[in-house]
Image (cartoon, grey):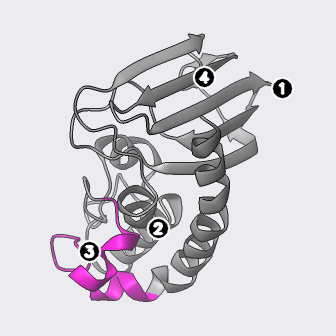
């Protein structure tokens, strides 16, 4: 477990550097995307591997700008939304593929605390999750949510995104996120 904590801490500056770089290149990277919303192979570390730059269903239905416009996927509207998707998920591919934790097959998964902790829907609480490979390599997630107003909560997410027992062969993304102004829904 001590090795996992040191690995997590060592990865923080790498993740923050790539996040900053992602914010800088996002407006230009979007211009290089294919019609379907995929970045060139050399830039895939900045993209979510499971969704194009057009975002996932939740993004499209709740957060995407101009979503009621028939031209939402055209011209400057598409550019803005793809840019915002990259800002929402900075360096996602890098944090998953290079800093991620792969539990491999035959891993042990455990948690302590409130597994329902989250901001959508709001469930104040704390949960600690841990996955351990058969060879002893460990990944963890510390997740804390506490509403402090009618609109915002403090959300802390540290470690690797082990929301549930990860599928064999999948990488859990490295995460270092402390947000005192995270919105929530009931």
**Residue placed most toward the observer, 142 or 136:** 136
- Classify mark 1: helix, strand or loop: loop
Q: Residue at x 48, y 66 (%)?
A: 84
x and y percent of residue 43 in the render?
33, 81
Q: In which quadrant of the rendered image does the C terminus lie?
A: top right
Q: In the image, is residue 83 above or below residue 69?
A: below
Query: Which residue range is magenta in the image?
Result: 28-48
Residue under pointer 2: 91
Mark nearest the camera among 3 and 1 is 1
Q: Which residue is mark 4?
A: 128
Disc number placed over residue 44 in the picture, else none: none
Which numbered disc flags the more N-terminal residue, 4 or 1? 4
Q: List the residue tagged with mark 1.
A: 148
Q: How many marks?
A: 4
The structure residue drawn at horizontal position 42% and vertical position 66%, both measured from the top left corner, is: 94
Query: Given this view, does label 4 or label 1 mark the residue nearer the observer?
Result: 4
Residue 171 appears in the figure? yes
Q: Quadrant of the N terminus?
A: top right
Query: What is the C-alpha distance between the residues marked 2 and 1?
Result: 29 Å
| First along the sequence among labels 2 and 3 | 3
Magenta stretch: includes residue 31: yes
Whole-angstrom CA distance, mark 4 to mark 2, is: 24 Å
């Amino acid at each position: 477990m001590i090795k996992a904590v040191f690995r997590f801490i060592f990865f923080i500056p790498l993740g923050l550097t790539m996040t900053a770089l992602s914010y800088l290149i996002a407006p230009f990277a979007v211009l290089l995307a294919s019609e379907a919303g995929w970045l060139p192979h050399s830039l895939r570390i900045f993209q979510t591997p499971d969704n194009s730059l057009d975002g996932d269903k939740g993004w499209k239905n709740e957060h995407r700008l101009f979503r009621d416009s028939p031209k939402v996927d055209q011209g400057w509207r598409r550019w803005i939304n793809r840019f915002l998707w990259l800002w929402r998920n900075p360096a996602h591919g890098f944090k998953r593929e290079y800093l991620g934790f792969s539990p491999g097959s035959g891993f042990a998964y455990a948690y302590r605390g409130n597994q329902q902790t989250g901001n959508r829907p709001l469930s104040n609480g704390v949960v600690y999750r841990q996955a351990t490979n058969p060879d002893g390599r460990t990944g963890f997630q510390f997740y804390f949510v506490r509403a402090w107003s009618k609109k915002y909560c403090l959300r802390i997410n540290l470690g690797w995104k082990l929301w549930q027992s990860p599928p064999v062969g999948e990488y859990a993304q490295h995460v270092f996120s402390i947000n005192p102004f995270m919105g929530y829904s009931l």
